[in-house]
Amino acid sequence: MKIDFVSDVACPWCAVGLFSLEEALRRVGAQLPVQLHFQPFELNPQMPAEGEDAVEHLSRKYGATPAQLAATRETLRQRGAEVGFTFGDRPRVWNTFDAHRLLHWAGLEGRQRELKHALLAAYHTHAQNPGSPEVLLRLCDEVGLDVERARAILAGAEYADDVRQRERFYQEQGISAVPSVIIDDRHLIQGGQPPEAFESALRQLAAEAGSTA
């Protein structure tokens, strides 16, 4: 089974969705071999390098009051804790395009999932800038990627076209919100669903595939 997880590092519900999906995969176990690929989506493609205050940005973008944003943060903390992800305070929103370039490269190196986890924790748990070369290089080192190769990628425009092409592809497929989980290029599950929802869908699709075969 092929699973494309379309998401942005800046999306907190993507962290919830990923950890929920991974818990569902653990429950299903080895009976369902899965190829998991992370696909790029930018919530804020025009975000400048210096970022923006998170409350100001989210209030303007979604029309939410500070009280509503605080309630959402608390919901995220609870949902994250249920699946093993820790949300901390995130005072700023930053650009994530370079993070997506490195994730594309990490996929070629077989370390995409590890880097995705590291980026989500850096951003949502520790409030670190995923657009900072220093942060990105440190995370690459932590997950076993070649730091000098990563440095060279960041210094140029390598994989920029690949990322933009994948972004356009999913936009053209109607993906306008994340996380979007696409199974075998045909079945779509959206949002930070609980593990039970992913588990049920995976078992049903696996059963359907088995009966078809």
Image: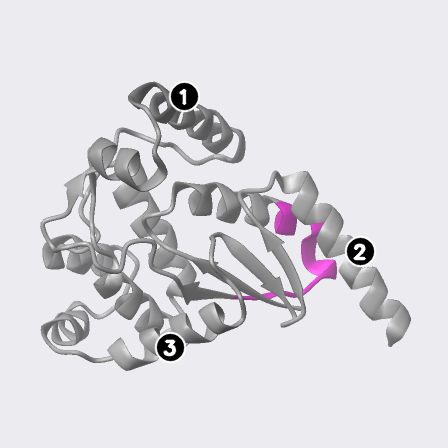
Residue 183: x and y, percent?
A: 64, 65
> Which residue reaches farthest top?
67
Q: Earlier in the sequence, mark 1 or mark 2?
A: 1
Label 1 close to label 3 by CB (< 8 Å): no
The correct choice, above or below, for 1 with respect to 24 in the image is below
Q: Earlier in the sequence, mark 2 or mark 3?
A: 3
Q: Main secondary structure of the magenta part?
A: helix
The residues colored magenta run: 24-36
Quadrant assignment, res 101 = bottom left
Residue 157 lies in magenta, yes or no? no
Of the residues tagged 1 and 3, which is closer to the observer? 1
Q: Would you name the residue on which mark 2 appears?
A: 204
Instruction: Say left or right for 210 vs 79.
Output: right
SS class of the residue under badge 3? helix
Q: Indicate which disc, 1 or 3, sits on the residue closer to the N terminus.
A: 1
Residue type at mark 1 is Ala
Q: Which mark is residue 9?
A: none
**Callout 1: SS:** helix
Give the residue pinned by disc 1: 71
**Three-letter code for the amino acid on which mark 2 is drawn:** Gln
